[in-house]
Amino acid sequence: MKNQTRPFTVVLLAPIAEQPIHALVAPSGDSILLSQDTKVSTLANCPDMIESEFGTYDEFLIEHRDQFMLFNQVASDLDPDLIFPKVHSDLLEDSLCIIRSIFAFERFKLEEEQKNATRKEPKEINQEYLMKRAIDQAMTLEQDVSDLSSNVERLQSPMS
């Protein structure tokens, strides 16, 4: 394959909000996908917006395959309109929910493990419950990021 395109990269943005915000950087490296509703916001060649990288989207899913399978299991029991709210859904845009859910799940699981370490009798960790919480948080964050990305685009557009 001569003309294979470069893949999207999973990144953590430098702190710009209360919650950590993960996004996808376009193969060209000059734009970023922040939310399902805002297709692409220009980075305006600001590499300092990116705090860390987690590899390509494929590499990310392979590295987190157990969490991805759990996401699919839990998401299959939820209302599809909750997770993929757009009529004409875009797989790349929907991947943001998956990425953010996996990171939130890992954070929730670590918190539960830390609580268990201090308990006399550790409690069983309900991973399905934690993933549902993670999906809920990812969708709440989606709305916040959609609002934030609209503001970023407005600030980056030339004054009329």
Image (cartoon, rainbow, N blue to C red):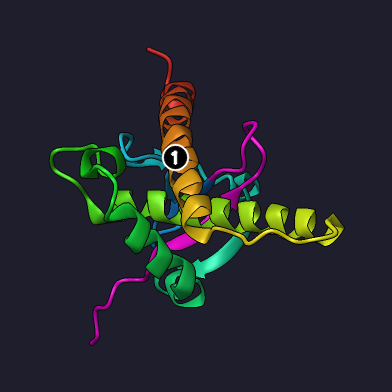
Name which residue lies at 61% across and 44% down. Answer: 49
- On-image quarter of the C terminus: top left
Question: 127 and 67: which one is in front?
Answer: 127
Q: Position of residue 136 (x, y in %)?
A: 44, 40
Image quarter (top left, top right, bottom left or bottom right) of the N terminus: bottom left
Residue 14, percent from left and from top: 65, 44
- Which kind of residue does numbered mark 1 sit on? Asp
User: Residue 143, located in which quarter of the rendered image?
Assistant: top left
Q: Mark 1 points at which residue?
A: 136
- The picture places residue 67, in percent across and down from the top left corner, at 47, 66
Instruction: Tell me where the magenta segment starts and ends, as one range.
Output: 1-21
The residue at 36%/71% (across/down) is 6
Q: Assign a secondary structure to mark 1.
A: helix
Q: Residue at x 38, y 69 (%)?
A: 69
Query: What percent of the width, then of the height, locates residue 61?
Result: 43, 71
Residue 113 relative to residue 4: left or right: right
Residue lying at the far top of the rendered structure = 160
Up/down of 139 relative to 89, above or below: above
Nearest the viewer among 49 and 125 is 125
- The answer to whether residue 52 is seen in the rendering is yes
